[in-house]
Amino acid sequence: FGDCSTPMGTPILELTSMNGVQILAVSLVMFVSTFGLFNVAGAIFVERTMAFVAERNATRQRRQLEDDELWVVSVSKLAKKIKQRLQGEEVKEEEEEATVGTRNWDLTNLEFSREALDRIVKSDDEVRQILANLDIDPQDNNHLADIADMDNTGTLRTPELILALRRLRGPARHGEIV
């Protein structure tokens, strides 16, 4: 009996004393209300699902941006990778005594050209992955050297790169959009 018919299969609307226009109107109202309710319920479900996913992604990104260990490890890997790639090119570094008595290269004094950074970022998949782990938009990779060289000398040092990376992390904020 769930399909609006009698046990003999006759539609209930045929048993009423309505004419064809009234039957059509009632059928249209039933059709519209049934599908309308399903559409509203479906829209509410989709909207709440999308809101949940957006909130979960925002929470994940906020945690990732606040993860100091990820920041330190990733920036250190990036500086070491840049140093490795620059070996053989002209690199200016100062040696520093390590506390345990061994010689250690100080990555904070690493100096390199904008062109060298551009080459490394464009050619090294591991460097691009490190930048992605830091939540830096891949579109910013091509402009990283320009952004980092704020004094327009053509030469970059690690602290300038770190400052640029810090500014580029995550989505653009209202104060950054000019």
Image (tube, helix red, strand yellow):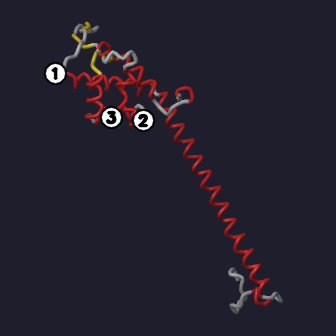
- Residue 54, horizontal then vertical, whole percent: 55, 44
> Distance of mark 3 from mark 2, alpha carbons?
10 Å
Q: Secondary structure at mark 2?
A: loop
Outermost residue on the left side: it is 88
Residue 110 place in picture, x, y as percent: 28, 15
Tell which circle, 1 or 3, labels the residue nearer the N-terminal end.
1
**Does residue 67 sit above or below 21 in this rendering?**
above
Quadrant in which residue 8 is drawn? bottom right
Q: Quadrant of the N terminus?
A: bottom right
SS for dot 3 = helix
Whether 24 is drawn above or below 176: the answer is: below
Farthest-out residue, bottom: 8
- Rate crowding at label 2 as few (under 14), some (14 to 19) or many (20 or more) other CA atoms within 10 Å: some
Residue at the image position 50 percent from the left and 37 percent from the top: 60
The mark found on residue 137 in the picture is 2
The residue tagged 3 is: 128
Note whether 172 is above or below 17 in the view shown: above
Q: What amino acid is found at the position of numbered circle 2 in the picture?
A: Asp
Tell me which residue sits at (26%, 30%) in the image. Answer: 119
The answer to whether the residue labelled 1 contacts the one labelled 2, judged by CB atoms less than 8 Å apart, is no
Residue wearing tag 1: 88
* Residue at 25% over, 34% down: 123
> Which amino acid lies under the numbered mark 1 shown in the image of this protein?
Gly
Find the residue positioned furthest to the right.
17
- Location of residue 73 (image quadrant): top left
Q: Earlier in the sequence, mark 1 or mark 2?
A: 1
Instruction: Please report contact status of discs 1 and 3: CB closer than 8 Å, yes or no.
Output: no
**Residue type, label 3:** Arg
Q: CA distance from mark 1 to mark 2?
A: 30 Å
